[in-house]
Amino acid sequence: MLRAVALAAESRGRTLPNPAVGCVVLDAEGVPVGEGWHRRAGGPHAEVLALAAAGSRAGGGTAVVTLEPCAHTGRTGPCTQALLSAGIARVVVGVPEPSSTAGGGAERLRAAGVDVQQMDGPERDAAEVVNAVWLTAVRRRRPYLTWKLASTLDGRVAAADGSSRWITGAAARADVHRLRAECDTILVGVGTVLADDPSLTVRPGDGSIPGRQPLRVVADTHGRTPSNAQVRDSAATTWVATADQVGSDPDGRVDLRSLLTELYERERRHVLLEGGPTLAGAAVAAGLVDRVVAYLAPALLGDGRAALGAAGVSTINATHRLELVDVRRVGDDVRIEATPLPRP
Ligand SMILES: NC(=O)c1ccc[n+]([C@@H]2O[C@H](COP(=O)([O-])OP(=O)(O)OC[C@H]3O[C@@H](n4cnc5c(N)ncnc54)[C@H](OP(=O)(O)O)[C@@H]3O)[C@@H](O)[C@H]2O)c1
């Protein structure tokens, strides 16, 4: 299973709106004879690739898959059928399929006489983590949301005059482009468009997938995004989402939950929030942030915008607590990855 998880890691961020999946096929004696990972949406699934690599040696063997094999015909045929046709006798599953459309694979295999085993413990956890973005999105029926920020050590994301380019160094900025390449959507508030006029595209060479740029979304209650803003150029598709289109929250601004639901309907599974403190605060307050990636520069600004605006916290007991997932140095900056802990 851990080998299948390592294979699934190869496909992370490249298969959206599909999951990251890895598969290892063993022959009847338990010798690994085929491996596969899902490379792109619309392409063959991991099981099909691993079975193809194994050929006739798959007969009477075992397929170890990070996600329950699908039982439905999407852009490709059902994996359950491919496993049955190859004569697989046993299937080991990392995580059960959460969506009702693709679910029922294990049941169908069992009905056909295949021994299906659902993993537990660290192997299942690893299969869950490698596919966390997609699993979270499907379970919550809204895209996974990663909030990225670049701040000084004193927590400022812009100087007193609103300028913020650049707080972090070239290595951190290249890392942001790799992060963008893993997402299918980039979200900012109109405040960031007006202040910085960002292009919000993935640079070639920084992990971009040829021909694929994330959708750019501007939360813009009244449609103030200028007609000559860079986000309106032809480098990528842009949606200026107004309150008229998606509805408004109690403060009269674009309703973020409805916006995310709409993006999910449009097959978007991973949103990178690159907005300023106002939009980030609203997203944190609404409990919509699934992961924070912070680039901290060894610099001090004093006066200037704090990284997070109003986030529904008025007393220390209400602090949004996070769990550290990863801390590392990127060039001269520090990259911190953290996920929210449940609210008390
Ligand atoms: N260092 C960094 O990582 C970083 C990243 C981005 C920006 N910045 C800096 O941040 C500053 C801009 O900050 P900002 O807070 O104005 O930018 P923002 O958060 O990107 O945009 C805020 C605007 O988004 C609109 N909005 C629409 N729906 C909203 C909702 N539900 N909740 C909150 N806002 C919503 C609001 O304007 P309407 O009501 O008119 O729609 C709001 O004023 C600039 O100085 C920029 O350089 C820094």
Image (spheres, rainbow, N blue to C red):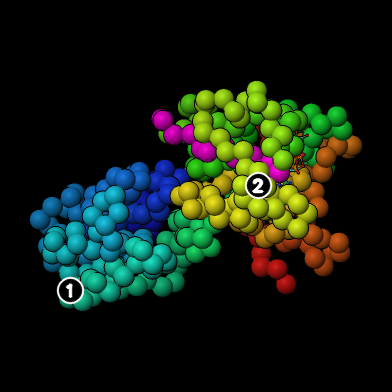
Whether residue 344 is visible, yes or no, is yes
Depicted 217 relative to depicted 67: above or below: above
Do the residues under discs 1 and 2 have CB atoms within 8 angstroms? no
The single residue placed furthest to the top in the displayed view is 228
Task: Say which residue appears at 74% left-offset and 31% top-offset.
Answer: 194
Which quadrant holds residue 212?
top left
Say what amino acid the circle numbered 1 marks: Ala
User: In the drawing, does residue 149 fall left or right of residue 112?
Assistant: right
Q: Nearer the viewer, residue 134 or 59?
A: 134
Residue 263, above or below 108:
above
Q: Residue at x 87, y 33 (%)?
A: 160
Residue behind mark 1: 112
The answer to whether residue 133 is visible is: no
Q: Residue furthest left?
A: 56
Could you tell whether 13 is left or right of 260 in the image? left
- Residue neighbourhood size for the residue with mark 2, other residues' Cα within 10 Å, grouped as few (<14), some (14–19), many (≥20): few
x, y (%) of residue 306?
82, 43
Q: Residue at x 19, y 49 (%)?
A: 53
Q: Which residues are magenta?
A: 210-221
Q: Nearer the viewer, mark 1 or mark 2?
A: 2
Q: Secondary structure at mark 1?
A: loop
Q: Is residue 171 magenta?
A: no
Indicate the position of residue 188 as horizontal and vertical percent values: 66, 40
Which quadrant does ligand 1 occupy? top right
